[in-house]
Each structure stands twice: as C-alpha cells, then as structure tokens.
C-alpha cells in the first residue's frame, strides 16, 4: 500500500494548498466587509490557483494509473510502482503544473486593465481576467483553451482508459467476492474523480448556457472549495 498512501499524502497536501489560495482571502473579505485585492495579490492568487488545480488533476491521473496496475497487473505491482517511479511521476506533475501556471500568469501580465476593476467572482479567475482586459486577448484565449484541452482533456482521457481496462479486468474475475474486493480498492478514487470532473464540467457548462457571472461564481465554489474538502473525508471513510 505504500504507493497509494504516498500519492494520497501528496493529494492531501495539494488539496490543502488549493483551498488556501481562496478561502483565507474570502474569509477576510467577509470579516472586513471589503472585497478589494491588489493587482499583485490577484496575479499571485491566480498563479497558485492554476498551479494546484492542474496539479490536483495530474495526481488524480497518477492515482488512476496506480489502481490500473494494482488490479490489471497485481503480481507486478510492487515492481512497476516502485518508489522511484512514484517520485518521478509526482515530480513531473509539479514541474508541468508550475510551468503551465507560470506561462498563463505571465501572459496575463502583458494585458492592460483599468485602475478600478471589478471582478464578478470570489477569486481572480483566469477567464474572468481575460474578459476584463482592455487589450487584445486573442492569443491569451487560444493558449488558455489549448492548455485546458491538453492539461484537462489529456488526463481525463487517461483516467477513462485506465478505468476501461480496470472494468474489463474485474468482469473477467469469476467469483463475486473477488469482483467486490477488486472494485472496492478503486471506489474511493472513482468517487473523487467523479466529484472533481462533474463539478468542473457543470460550472463551465452552466456558465456557457446562462452567461451569468454570479451563477458561475456560486457554482465555482463546488470545485474550488467543497470538492478538495470532501476528498479527505471520502478516503477516510474508505
């Protein structure tokens, strides 16, 4: 179980950091009744939100691969998921997430904004920043959608393929008890993945259909605050 708990510890750390980018500032705003944030603070918040959001996505993908190896190749699990590979996968996830969030933040720095700007959100979100800029954001939008497709769609495709192979392997097990035992090892991860992607997709689908910034901000609380807080509970119950 060492690889699983190593990945769980990293996921817990990332979830804590992910919620820490928005919740403390939100609580301060409620306490002081002031919704102001500096330009530097806004860019910093956006950078770390992107960093830990993408990293959360990558870690869920690595954990899906871990479950795939554990169920489809159980006799080779300790050989394949060795400490070196686990550390390398987590390190690559950190580096890729850092570079992606740094690139997006630097591109926002090239844009010009009004001095007194109102963001219709509870945190500095990349899409909102691009929409409120005074300068041309065509290249920024292209890069944002490209990064979303590669860093969001790519890991999701890997997770779907992993669970396709997992389900195929479970169906090949003859005993009912064996099927239940195999499925129970990935039930927590499947719950977390479903919660994360369903809330993210619902946010952007609802915002695209209603074009209401207020409804988008409210639903964003689900994947930015609620989902990371529920992840430890889901794995603890398991």
Image: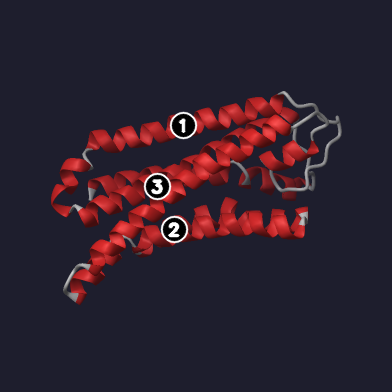
Residue highlighted by disc 1: 96
Answer with left or right where residue 95 lies relative to residue 208: left
The residue sitting at the bottom extreme is 176
Q: Nearer the viewer, mark 1 or mark 2?
A: 1
First-in-chain label (1 vs 2): 1
Secondary structure, mark 2, is helix
Give the residue drawn at x 73%, y 33%.
138
Q: CB atoms at circles 1 and 2 under 8 Å apart? A: no
Query: Mark 1 and 3 residues: CB-CB less than 8 Å, in contact?
Result: no
Q: Please tell me which of labels 2 and 3 falls first in the chain.
A: 3
Whichever of callouts 1 and 3 sits on the residue coming sooner in the sequence is 3
x%, y% of residue 77?
Answer: 18, 48
Q: Are marks 2 and 3 in contact (CB under 8 Å)?
A: no
What SS does tag 3 mark?
helix
Query: In the current view of this chain or complex, which residue is farthest to the left?
Result: 75
Disc 3 crowd rating (10 Å Cα; few below 14, some 14-19, many 20+) is: many
In the image: residue 210, left or right of residue 84: right
Q: Which residue is mark 2?
A: 192
Mark 1 vs mark 3, CA separation in Å: 14 Å
The one nearer the camera, 57 or 142, is: 142
Q: Nearer the viewer, mark 2 or mark 3?
A: 3
Between the C-alphas of marks 2 and 3, the distance is 11 Å
Report crowding for label 2: few under 14, some 14 to 19, many 20 or more residues within 10 A (C-alpha). Answer: some
Horizontal side, residue 232 vs residue 126: left or right: left
Element at badge 1?
helix
On the rendered image, what quadrant is the C terminus found in? bottom left
148 up-or-down from 99: above or below: below
Image x and y of residue 48, in percent:
57, 35
Residue 63, position as x, y percentages in the image? 35, 49
Q: Which residue is mark 3?
A: 61
Q: Residue at x 69, y 44 (%)?
A: 123
């Amino acid at each position: 179980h060492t690889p699983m708990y190593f990945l769980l510890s990293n996921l817990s750390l990332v979830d804590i950091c992910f919620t820490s980018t928005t919740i403390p500032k939100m609580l301060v705003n409620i306490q002081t009744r002031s919704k102001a944030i500096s330009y530097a603070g806004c860019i910093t918040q956006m950078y770390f939100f992107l960093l830990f959001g993408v990293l959360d996505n990558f870690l869920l993908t690595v954990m899906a691969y871990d479950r795939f190896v554990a169920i489809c190749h159980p006799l080779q699990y300790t050989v394949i998921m060795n400490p070196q590979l686990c550390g390398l996968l987590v390190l690559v996830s950190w580096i890729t997430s850092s570079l992606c969030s740094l690139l997006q933040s630097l591109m926002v720095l090239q844009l010009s904004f009004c001095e007194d700007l109102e963001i219709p959100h509870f945190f500095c979100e990349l899409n909102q920043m691009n929409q409120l800029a005074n300068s041309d954001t065509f290249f920024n939008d292209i890069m944002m959608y490209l990064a979303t497709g590669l860093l969001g769609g790519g890991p999701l495709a890997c997770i779907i393929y992993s669970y396709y192979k997992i389900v195929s392997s479970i169906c090949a097990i003859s005993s009912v008890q064996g099927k239940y035992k195999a499925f129970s090892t990935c039930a927590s991860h499947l719950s977390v993945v479903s919660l994360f992607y369903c809330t993210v997709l619902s946010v952007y689908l609802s915002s695209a259909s209603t074009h209401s910034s207020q409804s988008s901000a409210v639903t964003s609380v689900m994947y930015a605050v609620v989902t990371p807080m529920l992840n430890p509970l889901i794995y603890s119950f398991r």
